Amino acid sequence: MKTFASMAISVVVALTMLGAPAPASAAPPYPGTIETTTHARASRTHIPVGAAAYAVARVRVGGNAYPQGRMVVIWDGNTGKNYRMVKYKSQDRVVVGPAYLPRGTYDVRVYYFPTQGSVYQRSSDSFTQVVMKRRAYNTLYG
């Protein structure tokens, strides 16, 4: 009789758990928002001293929509940070970076920020760009 009662209680508990809602960790970050992905690349991964740095970025979403917002590009190197903030409206966006960057390796990060009240989410991407002596650049790439 005791085993039958304990089995009946466990069946009742199991059946009530079937209708329980999913935990909060299974929900999307913000209900009703659309995930975006940012793809960033350098027009040239190696540039000579004195040449301007360029970044090419695109924000993608599922379907054929083009999100609008702001794009921030940051060149972070051994001499500090340089950044550019531009509007993003459509497909590829070329951002002209700082000229006369000192020699070194720069981590370039691209951030996409949707317009206020938009259904799109933020996203980011990064790549590396190298500034080298003009003479070394010409022997390698010139």
Image (cartoon, helix red, strand yellow):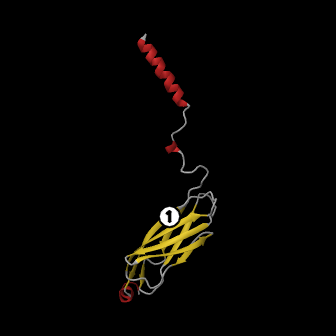
Which residue in the protein does label 1 denote?
A: 124
Question: Is 69 situated above or below 106?
Answer: above
Question: Where residue 15 sits: x, y (%)?
Answer: 52, 26
Quadrant housing residue 89: bottom right
Q: Determine the secondary structure under disc 1.
A: strand
Q: Which quadrant is the N terminus positioned in?
A: top left
- Residue 20: percent from left, percent from top: 54, 33
- Identify the residue at horizontal 55%, vertical 73% (top origin): 85
Q: Is residue 110 above or below residue 136?
A: above
Which residue is rendered at x = 49% and y = 24% of the image? 13
Task: Between residue 139 and residue 108, name the one nearer to us.
Answer: 108
Q: Is residue 98 left or right of residue 86?
A: left
**Quadrant showing the C terminus:** bottom left
113 in relation to 22, above or below: below
Q: Quadrant of residue 21?
A: top right
| Direction from residue 54 to residue 139 in the image, left or right | left
Residue that sits furthest to the top in the current view: 1
Choose between 113 and 14: the one closer to the eye. Answer: 113
Q: Position of residue 81 (x, y in %)?
A: 44, 75
